[in-house]
Amino acid sequence: MRKLKLFLINGFILTCTSFLLQTIGLFFNVYISNKIGSESVGVFQLLMSVYAFFITFALSGINLSCMRIISEEIARGYSGNVKKAMRYCVFYSAFFGFFAGGLLFFFAPFISANWLHGKVSPTPLYIISISLPFVAISSALKGYFSAVRRVSKTAFSEVFEQIVKVIIIAYLINLFMPPSVDYACISLVLGTTISEGLSFICLFVLYKLDRARYNNSRKNNSKFIRKLLRISLPIAFTSYIRSGLSTLQQILIPFRLEKSGISCELALSQYGQISGMVMPIIMFPCIFITSFCDLLIPEFSEYNVQNKSVQINYNITKIIKYTLYFSVCIFGIFICFSEELCSVIYNLPELSKFLVILSPTIILIYLDKVVDSILKGLDKQVRVMGINIIDLFSSISFIFFLLPIFGISGYLFVILFSESLNFILSLRILIKETHFKFDISCVLKPILCLISSVLSITALKCFFDVNIISLLLLVCLFVVFYLISLKVCERKII
């Protein structure tokens, strides 16, 4: 009971933190989009995809490795090994962080000229390369706090980081008005770099204060180097491939869109609208899933070490059921209010067509995140990475051949196909490894409730004008109708 209570408390803390961060991020993204325009947003998204690849190299699997090692030592009763294990994890992350930062700094001119369409100078890449050691070591420290179930420390550092980032970027963008693409990107990456550095300092101080509780605990002579490399290197290797393919995918999109007959500026603008505007809306409610996903890894890692297969299957069934209920509800909200959401958030109702087309990915993305976290906890992280690599290979192939023919419609198809393939393959592995039985009623019940809620709200919408107050009221009514329908449906089946 105490363990469940701690899990729920940590989940609540992470959810509240993520909600705050994502809310700030979404509204700040709207502010940035209005300030710098969709073309600059597209260029910045490309820059961030390059940065994401070097972050993957800097992390090299350290977060999951640290989380797994620390949680397993505590589960075995050797919590006195925590300090020694963390020393190896921090050294590992620092080595890869500095190496990745040096590589990005060295290749910045080439990347700027060839991958970013020559739209920005190497300066943003020089600046952001400085942040990579901080990002890497911070990831190890976050893995520690997740493993010991004290995520409030991580939450505090993330809120602090986001606030600093928003303040610095807002100041710099206004300082450089009217902003060019180059100055806009410099402002964004400079704020990111400074906030990452300060967040690292905050996390390191919290870690030093927290680790003292393990000084007099039981120890053994575990060989952490071998264990760290056994977990991290396969993850790192597959992560490099996955992230490299993902970066290639993002870089290819504007190039292949141009081949459909549109200008470079329009290609970057369309790419920015989907990747920088629509996808953040789709991913915003995912905070309620992601928060608990981070906690599932150490929980299932402990179940796996202790061979509790009955608990594993029971928990998987419950987790998938409630994830389906939640994701179908969000899917319904986006179907019902796509035009209103795009009008209120971006003042661009024409984006609603993209939101409607991509809204089915909500169910697939949310379920896939849960399934991947469970598989990582069960020591199947390499299989997860393998699925991601297969997904990326197929997506890149479709991007290369479809976008010149179908333009932006081809890109939308690639997103839908990619998320479907990823989820189906992940679910197949989970069923094979755990032998849990998928209950079809978990799909039918929320779909029936969704249909009734959509019909009810559609009838009410004609009585309301489009504004933020009426939108919030209608969304709340939709959720209430959906929950009541679910309750009725559950009782009838029981």
Image (cartoon, rainbow, N blue to C red):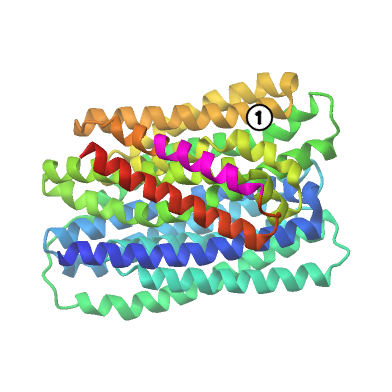
In the image, taking residue 63 as reference, residue 123 lies left or right, namely right
Q: Could you tell me which residue is drawn at 75 percent across and 39 percent down?
A: 270
Residue 9: x percent and y percent? 30, 67
Q: Nearer the viewer, residue 128 or 327?
A: 327
Whether residue 10 is in magenta: the answer is no
Q: Quadrant of residue 291?
A: bottom left
The answer to whether 443 is drawn above or below residue 338 in the figure is: above
Q: Is residue 94 visible?
A: no
Residue 401: x percent and y percent? 67, 18
Q: Could you tell me which residue is drawn at 57 percent across and 54 percent down?
A: 474
Q: Quadrant of residue 85?
A: bottom left
Label 1 Cα neighbours within 10 Å, binned few <14 / some 14-19 / many ≥20? many
Q: Could you tell me which residue is drawn at 41 percent across and 51 percent down?
A: 289
Q: Quadrant of the N terminus?
A: bottom left
The answer to whether 196 is drawn above or below residue 248 in the figure is: below
Residue extent of the magenta highlight: 448-462
Residue 238: x percent and y percent? 42, 37
In the image, taking residue 113 as reference, residue 240 lies left or right, namely left
User: Label 1: which residue?
Assistant: 411
Helix, strand or loop for disc 1: helix
Q: Nearer the viewer, residue 21 or 321?
A: 321
Q: Is residue 310 visible?
A: yes
Residue 418: x percent and y percent? 52, 29
Q: Could you tell me which residue is drawn at 67 percent across and 54 percent down?
A: 464
**Number of numbered discs on residues:** 1
Type of the residue with mark 1: Tyr
Q: Nearer the viewer, residue 298 or 489?
A: 489
